[in-house]
Amino acid sequence: MRVTNSPASRKRRGRMLTAAKGFRLKRSKLYRYASDAVDHGRQYAYRDRRTKKRNYRYLWQIRINAATRVLGMTYSRFIEGLKAANCELDRKVLADIAATDSAAFANLVTLAQNALKTKAASPKAAAAPKATAPKAAQAAPAAAGADDLEKIEGLGPKVSELLHAAGITTFAQLAAAPVTQLKEILHAAGSRYAMMDPTTWPEQSALAAKGDWAALEKIEDELKGGRRV
């Protein structure tokens, strides 16, 4: 007597057809086609569960950046200020506040600005001898007439420290620096910075050095993370 395990087989096929419910034509009725369709669908679902997280984070960053720039602050400085203030709101909540409650978001910007001022004046900022080379350069250029390089789109506080350590502390120096030199500085700092593209930094810095903020803002509207899109 041949044992076919028919009940389990029928149940397994039934589960597959249930998973394919709503698919078009044979893919919801015939097991072989339903099995292929469900397998493909699950692969795409696995991939896009991760893609969805990236897309939403990118959307939240855009909303926060737009709201902070209206209030005279950049996204990177805003996030740094919130961390310094020990604010535990995540980007999803911040983006929702930026879109629905401008008064509350303005209070958060003020909180971040005050925290940055406190951070700059704290004893830890003055205790530079213990720090590594990039951090040691953090406090020194401010007294030597250094410019705020973080006003350049795509350039955050960590990269600003790297440039200060390399002797680039003003807009004029950054405008005169070859792109190859900037890439070498980023590559030397590790893979985290090597993926950054400094191509537009000299162009932006030249406008900042002239004080042409209107032209700089126009260029920044064309950039995403410092890159032209």
Image: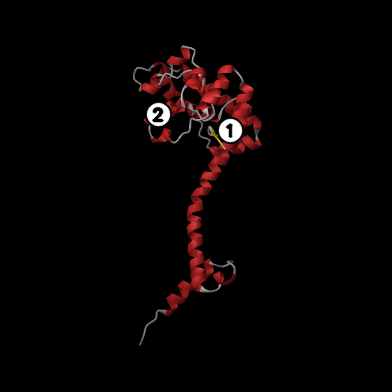
Q: Is residue 114 left or right of residue 122?
A: right
Q: Secondary structure at mark 1?
A: helix
Q: Is residue 212 above or below residue 100?
A: above
Q: Residues within 10 Å of mark 1 (few under 14, many from 20)?
A: some
Indicate which disc residue 184 carries: 2
Report the Cα–Cα distance between label 2 and label 1.
Answer: 29 Å
* Residue 106 visible, this orientation: no
Which mark sits nearer the N-terminus, 2 or 1?
1
Nearer to the camera, 42 or 199: 199
Location of residue 84 in the rendering, given as x and y in whole percent from the top left corner: 48, 26
Give coordinates of residue 11: x percent, y percent: 47, 74
- SS category of the residue bearing label 2: helix
Q: Looking at the image, is 130 positioned above or below residue 55?
A: above
- At a point 53% along the width and 48% down the height, the residue shown is 52
Residue 217 is left or right of residue 194, and the answer is: right
Residue 202 at x, y percent in the picture: 51, 25
Q: Quadrant of the N terminus?
A: bottom left
**Towards the viewer: 217 or 126:** 217
Q: Mark number for residue 46?
A: none
Q: Nearer the viewer, residue 181 or 55?
A: 181
Q: Which residue position is annotated with label 1?
A: 65
Reply above or below: 141 against 53.
above
**Residue 2 location, quadrant:** bottom left
Compared to residue 94, the image places residue 145 above or below, namely above
Front of the two marks 2 and 1: 2
Residues at circles 2 and 1 in contact by the CB criterion of under 8 Å: no
Q: Residues within 10 Å of mark 2 (few under 14, many from 20)?
A: few
Q: Looking at the image, can residue 37 be seen? A: yes
Q: Amino acid at mark 2?
A: Glu
Residue 194 appears in which quarter of the rendering? Answer: top left
